[in-house]
Each structure stands twice: as C-alpha cells, then as structure tokens.
Image: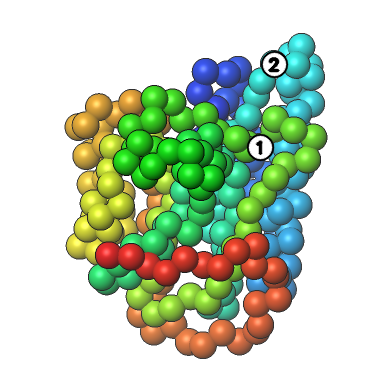
Amino acid sequence: MWAVADGMGGHDAGDIASQTVVEALNAVQQPNSAAELLEECETQVRKANAQIVALSQARNAATIGTTVAVLLIRDNHFACIWAGDSRIYRATGDAIAQLSTDHTEVQELLMNGTVSADEAKHWPSNIITRAIGVTPEPELDVITGAVETGDIFILCSDGLTRHLQDNEIHQCVTTHEPQDACNAMLALALERGGLDNVTVIVVRTPPDSKPASEPTISPLVRPVPRARS
C-alpha cells in the first residue's frame, strides 16, 4: 500500500488532515485477499474522514480537508482509490496513462465540453470538488486491474503535475531507479518554481511477476484507461 495525502491549501489544518489519513491507513492490518485489503483501506479512509469532520466542528465549522490517492497491490492485482487532485499514473516502457481522474472544477468543465483541452491547461484556478473531511461521507473513486510485468506506478500531489508534463514524468521513471526518479522530478519541479507542496512516489513491479492467483472481485467504477505515448 502506498498513499499520497495533500492538505487543502488556503484552509485550516491541512497538515493535520493529511496526517490523519496517513495514520488511518497505517492501521490497515495484513489482509487475507486483495478484496479484503481494498475493503479495509476504504474503511480506514472513512474513519479518517469522520475524525477530520469532528475536528472541523470543534473549530467552529472551519473548512479542513485533504486529498488522498492510494495504490494497493496484492497477488498481481492493483486497486486505486482517490479523492481530489492527487494523481495515480501507470507507465510502461513506451507509454504513460493517468489512472485517476482529477476531482476538480476545471476537469468537470472539460468533461462536459465547457472548456477545451487547451483552455483547461491555462485555467486560472484549480478548485477541487472532492476531498476527505469536507462532507459526512467521503466520495471515493475506485478502479481495479491486473498488474503487468514491468508496470511502473506513480503517485503524486498536484505540486508535481503543475510543473511536469506526463511525458516528462514518463521519461524520468523509465530512465531512473525509483528513488532517483523521485529525486529528479522533485528537483525539476522546484527548479520551475515549486508553487505547491511536491510529493511523489514511484513503484516499480518486479520483472518476474506471475499470473494472479485470485480473482479481482471488487467492482470497477470505470475502465482502466489505455496507456498513451
């Protein structure tokens, strides 16, 4: 299990909110199956949501929240769980695909055709439409799929994707070892201004992965997108 939680900028206690999610995920026990791991992860995120909501009420209903992006891998199955604009990608030797979909105002405008892809790139603000801690019940998106030999997964905050294009992320993760790739992307984001917190995790699957030993029984919310060059 790997996770990124990015506290909402401009609001109270974003650092506390993100830490609450991380601590909740740390409490996940060793599962007996991929489905059990996914269920336990979702349960812990909901517990964290309740804790953050309670903190907000104790602070006179202050807006407190955090994004979350979680990658689970078990027996050659993966699951992605997220809320907000922290992203999860999957890269191969020749392509990269964003597995998560940003929960942002501009993404909604893009999907309903109000703005073009080019206009979306230069949209003046990046208001998130989902987060952990801002509603009594969190809205989580989940996708699942099979891990393929050579897959590289990337989890990151929007502080990285503000400064690096997908093709640059792909170049870094396919030409460096995971930690070196993280260091290179962090350095590049900071060199280009570092306008927000920059968090990135790179997970490389072993080259000798075996076929899955159990079925993926958790539901697919939407199809896993095809990789693009």
Query: Splitting the image into 4 quarters, where does residue 172 fall?
Result: bottom left
Q: Is residue 176 left or right of residue 13?
A: left
Q: Residue at x 56, y 84 (%)?
A: 212
Looking at the picture, tell me which residue is in the foreground, 4 or 180: 4
Q: Is residue 180 visible?
A: no
Q: How dense is the environment of label 2, judged by Cα within 10 Å: few (below 14), some, or many (20 and up)?
A: some
Q: Position of residue 57 (x, y in %)?
A: 79, 19
Vertically, is 121 above or below 88? above
Q: Residue at x 73, y 37 (%)?
A: 49
Q: Residue at x 39, y 25 (%)?
A: 124
Looking at the picture, tell me which residue is in the foreground, 89 or 105: 105
Image quadrant for the N terminus?
A: bottom right
Q: Position of residue 64 (x, y in %)?
A: 65, 24
Question: Is the C-beta separation of discs 1 and 2 under 8 Å?
Answer: no
Tell me the SS state at disc 2: loop
Vertically, is 69 above or below 93? above
Residue type at the position of mark 1: Ile
Image quadrant for the C terminus?
A: bottom left
Q: Earlier in the sequence, mark 1 or mark 2?
A: 2
Q: Residue at x 63, y 29 (%)?
A: 65
Q: How dense is the environment of label 1, judged by Cα within 10 Å: few (below 14), some, or many (20 and up)?
A: many
Q: Position of residue 159 (x, y in %)?
A: 38, 35
Question: Tag on residue 187?
Answer: none
Query: Splitting the image into 4 quarters, where does residue 227 fall?
Result: bottom left
Q: Is residue 193 visible?
A: yes
Tell me the SS state at disc 1: loop
Residue type at the position of mark 2: Ala
Residue beneath label 1, please?
132
Residue beneath label 2, please?
62
